[in-house]
Image (cartoon, rainbow, N blue to C red):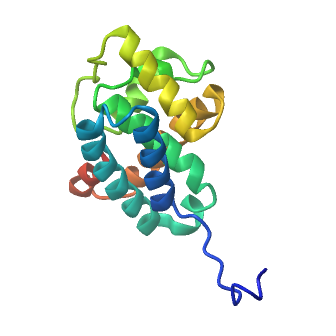
Amino acid sequence: LLLDLQWQVNAPTLESWISILGARFGVTTEELYAKPLAWATEKMRQLAKRLVEWKAADWQRRPQRLAAGLFGIGLASEGLLHIEDLRPQYVYTQEWEELFLGTQTRTVLPRCRLSPRYAQHVLTSFIGAANLPMEELQQDCEFTMRCLQDAAGALRPMQRLAFAL
């Protein structure tokens, strides 16, 4: 197989995983959330690019999982998910909210603007698009937020805004 490919194998990147998740999510939601998802996806790509530029070797070890975390954070930032749904059980609510705010340019937590039925639909679609159990997605969101914090902490204050959604 490698000979047929002339030893040119391209592993999925963080950006390609974001595209894959977006496409899968769009299919499962029948593009119902296309507008907010388009904005969130663009922000995810910008963050992904900055993360990779900042410390490529570390971020690229888990591109699928980092993309899932960015995707969840993006959905919550756009008011399509409750941020509490993304919190791992072992993280206290206050710590989670502070961690989430650390990834935002705003000072107030985003609120889900969907009815409970539609919010559940978005959550189910996110789980299906990522093809991961909810517990792992929650861990991915935590991992991603901690990566964003680490990256932002290494930058000068004016550059930190570039690492927020």
Q: Is residue 58 above or below residue 10?
A: above
Q: In this view of the protein, which residue sits in the foreground, 135 or 95?
A: 135
Q: Which residue sits at x=55%, y=31%?
A: 127
Q: How many marks?
A: 0
Residue 120 x/y as whole percent: 45, 16
Residue at 62%, 69% (x, y): give it: 11
- Residue 115: x and y in percent read 31, 10
Report whether 119 appears left or right of 64.
left
Placement of 31 over or under 123, stated as above or below: below
Of 50 and 121, the residue lying toward us: 121
Question: x and y percent of residue 20 in the render?
Answer: 49, 52
**Quadrant in the picture for the C terminus:** top left
Q: In the image, what residue occupies the spot 57% across and 22% down?
A: 91
Answer with the quarter of the image where residue 8 lies: bottom right
Between residues 147 and 139, which one lies in front from this camera angle?
A: 139
Which quadrant is the N terminus positioned in?
Answer: bottom right
User: Quarter-wise, where is residue 83 in the image?
Assistant: top left
Report the side of 104 relative to 128 (left or right): left
Q: Position of residue 109 (x, y in %)?
A: 29, 23
Please indicate, yes or no, whether residue 101 appears anywhere in the rendered image: yes
Residue drawn 76% across and 82% down?
2
Q: Is residue 124 above or below residue 162?
A: above
Q: Please say whether residue 165 is visible from this viewpoint.
A: no
Farthest-out residue, top:
116
Rendering quarter of residue 100: top left
Q: Is residue 137 left or right of residue 126?
A: right
